[in-house]
Amino acid sequence: MAELMLPYRVRHVEVWQPSDAEERPPMAPLPKSLPRRMSRLSRAVLSCVSRVAAVVGEEALQYPVVYASRYGEIARTLDLFAEYEQYGEMSPAGFSVSVHNAPASLLSLVTGNCENSTTLAAGEDTLRMGMLEAALRSADGPCLFVYGDEQQMEREVVSVVAAVIESNSILRPLPRTVNELLQQI
């Protein structure tokens, strides 16, 4: 099968991965009510995006957003199931930030971004399909691409990537992995 080639470029990318030295991702200033409700994944997404904006400029916070995540807020969802099993009910506040697009919604709330936002999951091809959406969307102007996932059982952020994607005349293949995305800079 032929490789799909699209005219886009990666203007800037930031990656966050957990390490022993970094238990929690650094945070930008937030409304006081948000931090206690935010998951590790949401914190990592906001951290990565704020680092992109620090390099590219604050206007990146107002670009349309494509958020791709294979499992979404799986750790929070598993906690809700355990809560339901133990108490017979779930916390409405916990549920509100357990949905798949919670990090993208929190990003919109924190930045005041009213542009279009797309959240998608595509199994093993989630990163690639997210980049497809971002590359196609970039035909109308730059967009912010964010990929974030947690491992199901370890409940640890595997990786979060935030990048500004722009239209370009050079055809590029869609990356399948974070490393392939980093090679396109």
Image (tube, rainbow, N blue to C red):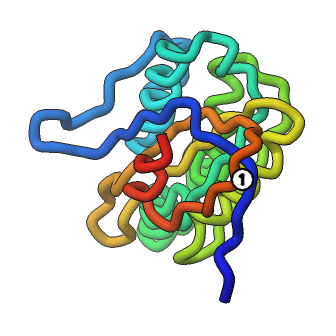
Q: Is residue 144 left or right of residue 183?
A: right
Image spot of residue 84 (x, y percent): 51, 67
Instruction: Describe the element under mark 1 as helix, strand or loop.
Output: strand
Q: Quadrant of the N terminus?
A: bottom right
In this view, which residue lies farthest toward the left? 20
In this view, which residue lies farthest toward the bottom? 1
Image spot of residue 54 (x, y percent): 48, 13
As displayed, is residue 40 above or below residue 12? below
Q: Is residue 61 left or right of residue 14?
A: right
Looking at the image, how many numbered discs can be counted on the residues? 1
Q: Is residue 136 visible?
A: yes
Q: Residue at x 55, y 37 (%)?
A: 163
As displayed, is residue 28 above or below residue 12? above
As displayed, is residue 155 above or below residue 103? below
Q: Residue at x 74, y 57 (%)?
A: 6
In this view, which residue lies farthest toward the front? 170
The amino acid type found where label 1 is placed reads: Thr
Question: Of residues 177 and 116, which is closer to you in this image?
Answer: 177
Q: Is residue 71 visible?
A: no
Image spot of residue 50 (x, y percent): 49, 21
Q: Is residue 177 left or right of residue 154?
A: right
The residue that disc 1 covers is: 119
Image spot of residue 39 (x, y percent): 44, 42
Q: Residue at x 32, y 71 (%)?
A: 153
In terms of image quadrants, where is residue 86?
bottom left
Q: Residue at x 71, y 35 (%)?
A: 166
In terms of image quadrants, where is residue 68?
bottom right
